[in-house]
């Protein structure tokens, strides 16, 4: 039986595809290549270029490859963009997830892993934030993902679909073997942007808000290495296949770093003291997001391998240097 990875040519999705291929799993990819790269995939994995909202295409893939599980990454993910284009985010993230789930149920897919986000919590009242904390998203991106979670849970109740929802905190780093990494132009993720500045691809970097109620005035985030994150997905699939109940898990390390701490690490590891400018707060940015990951560790027996900011930064820098040398084409 085959695993369908949607958005599998993207940043996190391509890491998942390599993880599955390395384990010898049958895997196919559906990606519209709007931000993904076909060259990020193993040559042995079949790519279909198309949308998760194309129900006929998805149904054909499920039937042809006898798909038993879907790992759903395909989404629009930039918080500021969601504030400018909320309809686009609800269309791509929520409506397309509805259509994908319809095809999955009709095709007899048994297991569904959903890529969600800590943005569903908004500005949490308690840190670290647990899975049962109030859901108060402050961006259309977070709202679109929370709506998708509700659709998935209702669908599962009606049709017996097994699911795991994984709420990501801040994903960063790159494949230690440098087979894939974050390659989208115009990236907004801090470690990616700082790595670009460190190798000279950006003249400077802005800190959006220096007056937050945190020790150094900048936002705090829980950074998780992308390889550890996709291994949590593999553990989630094993868990469902072993009869595990439907579940929601935070994915982070349970420890936060401020923007200034991250920039200091990138400067130190790269050896480049690139310019940093203070800018105003950015709409949709929570003050402090750190995961309570006790449920993930206990239920999935997840043991991260790269739980270290310096390691995450070093891998991100290595990937950025590879890109600078001409590493990734569509």
Image (cartoon, helix red, strand yellow):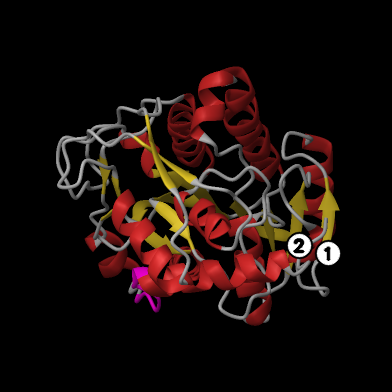
309 or 139, which lies in front? Answer: 309
Q: Position of residue 45 (x, y in %)?
A: 79, 69
- Residue 170 is at least partly visible in this image: yes
Instruction: Please give the label number shown on residue 28.
Output: 2
140 or 165, which lies in front? Answer: 140
Label 2 to label 1: alpha-carbon separation: 5 Å
Give above or below for 139 relative to 229: above
At 68% from the left edge and 76% from the top edge, which residue is drawn?
21
Residues marked 2 and 1 touching at CB (< 8 Å): yes
> Which quarter of the image is occupied by the N terminus?
bottom right
Horizontal side of residue 47 vs 166, given as left or right: right
Q: Main secondary structure of the magenta part?
A: loop
Give above or below for 103 relative to 198: above
Give above or below for 27 relative to 55: below
At 29% from the left edge and 68% from the top edge, which residue is drawn?
297
Give above or below for 21 relative to 287: below
At 40% from the left edge and 62% from the top edge, which residue is drawn?
224
Q: Quadrant of residue 265?
A: bottom left
Instruction: Please give the label number shown on residue 46.
Output: 1
> What's drawn in magenta, residue-wise?
303-309
Callout 1 environment at 10 Å: few (<14), some (14 to 19), or many (20+)?
few
Q: Quadrant of residue 243?
A: bottom left
Element under disc 1: strand
- Residue 242 is at least partly visible in this image: no
């Amino acid at each position: 039986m085959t695993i369908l990875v949607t958005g599998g040519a993207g940043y996190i999705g391509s890491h998942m595809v390599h993880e599955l291929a390395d384990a010898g799993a049958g895997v196919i990819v559906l990606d519209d290549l709007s931000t993904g790269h076909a060259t990020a995939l193993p040559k042995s994995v079949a790519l279909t270029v198309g949308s998760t909202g194309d129900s006929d295409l998805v149904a054909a893939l499920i039937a042809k490859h006898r798909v038993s599980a879907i790992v759903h990454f395909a989404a629009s993910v930039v918080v500021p963009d969601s504030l400018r284009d909320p309809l686009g985010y609800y269309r791509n993230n929520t409506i397309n997830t509805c259509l994908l789930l319809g095809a999955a149920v009709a095709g007899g897919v048994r297991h569904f892993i959903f890529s969600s986000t800590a943005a569903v919590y908004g500005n949490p009242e308690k840190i670290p934030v647990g899975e049962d904390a109030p859901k108060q998203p402050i961006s259309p991106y977070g709202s679109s993902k929370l709506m998708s979670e509700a659709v998935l849970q209702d669908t599962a109740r009606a049709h017996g679909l097994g699911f795991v929802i994984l709420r990501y905190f801040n994903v960063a780093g790159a494949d230690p073997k440098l087979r894939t990494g974050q390659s989208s132009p115009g990236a907004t993720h801090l470690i990616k942007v700082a790595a670009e500045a460190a190798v000279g691809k950006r003249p400077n970097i802005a800190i959006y808000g220096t007056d937050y109620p945190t020790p150094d005035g900048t936002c705090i985030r829980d950074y998780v290495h992308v390889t550890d994150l996709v291994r949590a997905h593999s553990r989630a699939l094993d868990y469902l296949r072993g009869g595990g109940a439907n579940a929601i898990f935070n994915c982070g390390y349970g420890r936060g770093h401020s923007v200034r701490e991250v920039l200091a690490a990138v400067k130190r590891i790269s050896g480049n003291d690139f310019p940093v400018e203070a800018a105003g707060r950015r709409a949709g940015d929570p003050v402090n997001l750190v995961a309570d990951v006790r449920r993930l560790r206990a239920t999935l027996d997840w043991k991260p391998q790269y739980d270290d900011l310096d390691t995450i930064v070093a891998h991100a820098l290595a990937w950025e240097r590879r890109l600078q040398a001409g590493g990734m084409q569509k």
